Amino acid sequence: MFDKRYYYLIKIQYLGYRFHGWQKQPDVKTVHLMIDRTLKYIFQDTRFKTLGAGRTDAMVSANEAALELFIYNEPIEDFDAFLDVFNHNLPQDIRALSIEEVDKTFNIIQDSKLKEYHYVFSEGQKNHPFCAPILTTILEPLDVDLMKQGAKLFEGSHNFKTYCYRATDRGEYNRTIVSSEIVDNDIYLANFFPEKTYVFKVVGKGFMRNQIRLMFGCLIKLGRGEVTLDYIKDTLKKESTEVMDYIAPASGLILHSVNFE
């Protein structure tokens, strides 16, 4: 007799500041570990499996991330009741947003999806310590207007090998960025935030290891006057051998949304 399997797409959000990323690892606390522990407590003896739509690094947060839940033999009958008990038992820095049933053809890893990342930052001053989990403070003054020009250069299809951590000669580094811009921050607000903050917004189908943080690291260097717009253009050419040497801090990075096409 074959086990019947049921498939669900769950959207979640989490503050990544105290987690060692999404992926389960020995002897450290990760988001995936805490989710599976909670589901194990809820489901008791019911078999299940979870897969994430992607991985986030240590201290990276998510406003909307996605995971696929497979349950064997025992379907979820009441979605509202499930969300209530799931959220009641999850740690306070993880929250389930929604759940919907999908069919067996849905593949959370391979199905086409758009991800939007946000990098929240301020410049030129020391901020309230409470900002640290989601806002990166760049102490030096930055030319933000120049950085805005630099951000637009990442749009389109380019060779992003320079912006992949520990890239090798065997990888595929051509990626398409749908949108890349720096805007005033009116999304993440708190009364202890500085008066002026910004968001680096990037939308694309797939990103490589540390790609967003390396891209923003380059923009920080641009804002400091250490590199030029022409330098960024050259790093995106097929023949570029440049290696980006500055990775922006993780705690300013937020997976803002995941949308399946």
Image: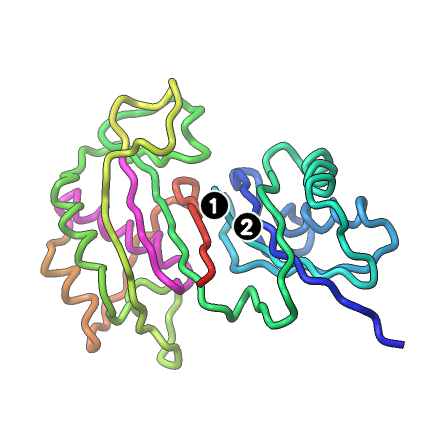
Q: Judge whether 261 appears above or below 32 on screen.
A: below
Residue visible at 71% across and 41% down in the picture? 86
Amino acid beneath label 2: Gly
Q: Is residue 96 magenta?
A: no
**Way the structure is coloured:** rainbow
Side of 73 relative to 69 (left or right): right
Task: Categorize mark 1 by other alpha carbons within 10 Å: few (<14), some (14-19), many (20+).
Answer: many
Q: In front: 251, or 257?
A: 257
> For residue 199, which quarter of the picture?
top left
Magenta highlight range: 198-226
SS state under label 1 = loop
Amino acid beneath label 1: Val
Side of 191 relative to 19 (left or right): left
Q: Judge whether 197 appears above or below 261 on screen.
A: above
Q: Earlier in the sequence, mark 1 or mark 2?
A: 2
Please, which residue is most extreme toward the top here?
A: 191
Q: Judge whether 129 appears above or below 82 on screen.
A: above
Return the residue at label 2.
21
The numbered dot on residue 60 is 1
Task: Categorize mark 2 by other alpha carbons within 10 Å: few (<14), some (14-19), many (20+).
Answer: many
